[in-house]
Image (spheres, rainbow, N blue to C red):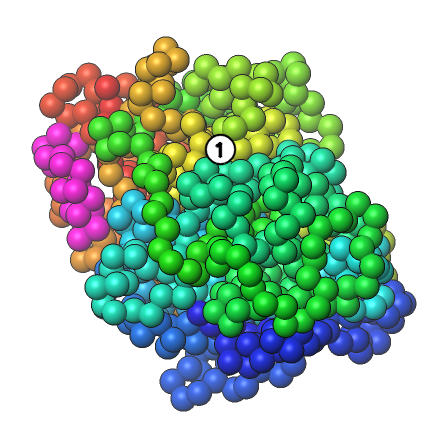
Amino acid sequence: MGVICSAGRGVDEFRKSLIAGKTCISRVEDPRIAHFGPQFAGLVGEIDSPEPGESAFSAEDRFVKLAYIAASEALRQSGVALSGRERTGLVLGTCSGPMLTIEELYLQEINGSNSCSEDLLFKKQYYSAAMLLASAFGVKGSVLTVTTACSAFNAAIAAAGDLIRCGILDTALVGGADAFSVTTLCGFAGLKATSRQPCAPFSLPSGLNLGEGAGFLVLEESGYARSRGATIAGEILGYGLSNDAYHCSAPDPSGKGASFSMQLAFRDSGVTPEVIGYISAHGTGTEANDKAETKAIKKVFGEWSGSVPVSSLKSMVGHCLGAAGAVETVASLICSKNGIYPPTANFTVAREGCNLDYVPDAGRSWKGEHVFIKNNFAFGGNNASVIVSTGSEISIPENGIPDTDPVCISGIGVVSAAGIGWDKFEDFSVNGITFREKVTRDGSRLRVAEVPDFELSSIDRKLNSRGIDRAGKMACAAGALALKNAGISDRPSSRSEIGFYMNLAHGSTWAEPEHIRPLLKNGYQLEQINVFPFIVPNSVTGTVCRVLSLTGYNNTFCNGPGAGLLGLGMAWAAVKNNHASAFLCGTVDDMSEQGLIDCFLSEKGKGAEAAAGEGSVMFFLEPLSRAEARGATPICLIRGIEFSFDGCVSGGDAGRSSLENLLNSVINKAGVEKSRVGMVCYNSWNERERETVKTVLGDELQTVDLTPVIGFAPSSSPLYNLTAALKSGLVGKNEHKNYIVTFFSSLRGMSCVVVLEVF
């Protein structure tokens, strides 16, 4: 494990602060925000210059440097080498991502400088840090970015755990990172959520302090770790994710969503609440969170709730946002090894509604089982709980569905420039698409294929578009269509435990410019606060969950171009691991926002011939046995999925041979003869993909690429292509050519290939 935060730069220094129960929160001395009154935060201070050979990180966003420091320590401590090994991955969780770079770009815009290089556009993307780190450490497998705000690290643990359980990875470097941002502090202060003293979770006064930092763990499949003689710090027993489907920022006051994530973690781990020796609480210090979390703990632990120690590390280091779970998990591992509980510093008297054992004193001996549960909850309604054992090995049940029960796609919903619904895809050609011109940051013009205006009530009269942003409306429409196509009732009880994976190309939302630009222009005076909760990338996920009543297993990924196909792979792994009976998995691209235009340009370059596209695609995934039991008609089976990373973060050719190897590998592992592949979906503008198809599968195949027709939508295009292939009906009629291969290779190095069997 590795860590950097206000309480320590490295595990050893962090350990000393924890044992002493030292509060490492200080006053923010920044005249720009003096009008908000006293503000406190857990700040790291100056970061040491990179050592020789690490200069590539000296000019990166602060949160990237924090992540690199913690990840490097974790790798050194583990003794594992990632470089040169194929089955290695990296999953990074973040809330605000490269916010300091984003702020700098808005300042340039305000000052009249609109020039923005392709490289800088890449560095402002939320996924850039994971790719930079993966390139530096030699990662060859899955490289993912989780953006579920303050629960991002726990959700990243879940994503990496699924890939290890499915045998896709042996080793994963998993972390969370966020840097302190003044515009973020302004948002929380504007919501009156901050404390004007060092925070005291579950006590008085109420309110949070922000923090910054990073924490990383090296996760390995247990058998592999033991075979190499690794020193094991802890064992991930299980994890659970959920969504409140309640409000954009406030937690469900009943604690229902938080309790559900814990219940799912217990179900996944096979242990019961009485085994838990400690609860590492989310514990932000706010009235709403602390009361809701206390209710959730009492609901899950019942008669045991009063006897299980609960504490919040945010009292020592502040709220580190996407890094919170990472720093707090490292703290729990350290404290368990040293036989003490992390204290809730600054605790004086319990606040109303908070009546558990919150460990007010430092140095209390750890009693009972060395098994803890780590809770983190977030804007957008995302909840995440992870159960970890640091004592003797605990047997974990086999929860996954059997290999004899393949995952199928049984519903599809599409919103595109062609129109609403997948029946608009006819013969791979659509007439009447309107391409508009949009002005980019440097004043040049970009052709964009836009989704026609529509109302959600046109899909389902019970749905209302009022108060929903454009991206949310498109995603809700595609999700409603997929659920309807799959034959799922619109009753909330029928949808409450359906999982949902949202996959985004970029992190910027409509609220980002609405919040940041006025702040920077007007001396950090807040013009409106109601937009701030929607600045997090998973806000669109929260919207879909609220509208469609989805409270089940829930995650949001921000993986750049090709995100939709990567997300399909992650949803497949979640179904295989039986986290929910079924999953909705999809994408949304909204070209009305500068952020997505920047993402488009950072990947394809300004001279690309393809127009930009937008829209949303949703697939409904479930085990074949479940689909058959409820009388559904499966559209296809997912027979194979693989990921690879080439580390080509500076653009250019990431290596055609590696893509050929990936395509050959997934086809072979799926047990499919190449002669039975009837159709290939790919990006025709990508020369590497064109040549790979020709080399591996020949040039006689039917190919699908809707980019020339509806534009290139960074996240959705791979799923558009797959939808068109399935809709065509051309594959499956010939039983000897009833397989579809679909793949995407980012010019930044991330590739994914999926093999599907059509009935």
| Coordinates of residue 268 in the picture (x, y in percent) | 43, 40
How many residues crowd around disc 1 within 10 Å: few (fewer than 14), some, or many (20 or more)? many
Visible residue check, residue 67: no
Quadrant the C terminus occupies:
top left
Q: Which residues are magenta?
A: 660-677
Is residue 675 within the magenta segment? yes
| Residue found at x 23% / y 68% | 228
Question: Three-letter amino acid code at disc 1?
Answer: Gly
Residue denoted by label 1: 499
| Residue found at x 16% / y 42% | 669
| Coordinates of residue 536 in the picture (x, y in percent) | 63, 50
Near-viewer residue (707 or 483): 483
What element does badge 1 sit on? strand
Near-viewer residue (106 or 628): 628
Magenta highlight: main SS: helix
Q: Quadrant of residue 670?
A: top left
